[in-house]
Image (cartoon, rainbow, N blue to C red):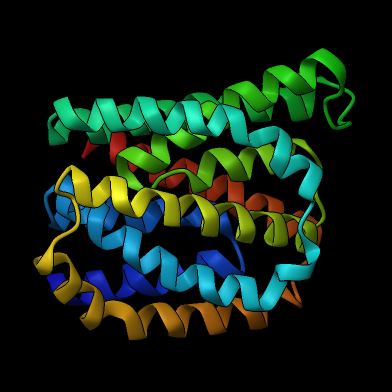
Amino acid sequence: MAWVLLAVASVIVGFSKTAFPGINTISIAIFAAILPARASTGTLLLLLIIGDVFALVSYRRHADWPTLARLLPAVVVGLGLGALFLAFADDDWVRRTIGLILLLLIAVTLWRRYRSSGAAPSGRAAGIARAGYGSLGGFTTMVANAGGPPIALYFLAMRFEVLAFLGTAAWFFAVINLVKVPIAIGIGIIGLDTLQWVLLLAPAVIAGALSGRWLAKRVTQQAFEWVVIVGTVLGALYLLVA
């Protein structure tokens, strides 16, 4: 049964890369429930990089480069904090901290969507949003590859259309995940046992990525946004109570 769940989670990894980034939290929850948090982090990182390849092939021309450049400093800060946290925290703290952070981000995002004008943040508000979402995205992606939901929520706040969303996310996570590899090796998250899991689960990631690319061409903007939000909520709740 564990193998079936890991295969399903791997399909979701690929699917999230080419269709709905927020739902990747579900795969994180499954891996964390079956494997120790650190082992699941290393395995997921390499599986996510496989998904990144398909996302770049599909959406590389649709990135919003100014947004990426402005977001990077906050993400780097979050990566550093995440590496320190991971070096000292135990598995339970890792899961619960991520779940709590995601729920807080969802609350902020929904509050802004329905209590403000609905326009993308600008000026000082935009800077605060970049600092908050970016640093938390860097932190959670370093701790347990859960950066997808915070960054997805930021892109939703910026009112990106589907292709711009997917293209910007593709480049963002391709670069960030590659940067994380030497850090993960250095703190013992990636090893030979991790590579064995990756070889077995890679076909499921590829199948999910191809399915996601097919669906992304047909989904409406409203449906896309709600799937991202609902997927993030479910994954965050699971991590919080697991």
- The x, y position of residue 19, in whole percent, is 61, 68
* Residue visible at 71% across and 69% down in the picture: 60
Q: Is residue 215 left or right of residue 190?
A: right
- Residue 89 in sight in this render: no
Asked whether 205 or 180 is in front, the reply is: 180
- Residue 178 in sight in this render: yes
Asked whether 63 or 148 is in front, the reply is: 63
For residue 59, above or below residue 136? below
* Residue visible at 43% across and 66% down in the picture: 49
Q: Quadrant of residue 134?
A: top right
Q: Is residue 43 left or right of residue 90?
A: right
Q: Quadrant of residue 151?
A: top right
- The x, y position of residue 36, in whole percent, is 11, 49
Asked whether 160 or 104 is in front, the reply is: 160
Looking at this rendering, what residue extends furthest in the top direction?
124
Q: Is residue 233 left or right of residue 95?
A: right
Q: Quadrant of the N terminus?
A: bottom left
- The x, y position of residue 144, in whole percent, is 31, 44
Q: Quadrant of residue 86?
A: top left
For residue 141, above or below residue 204? above
* Residue visible at 45% across and 85% down in the picture: 207
* Residue visible at 28% across and 76% down in the picture: 7
For residue 177, above or below residue 77? below
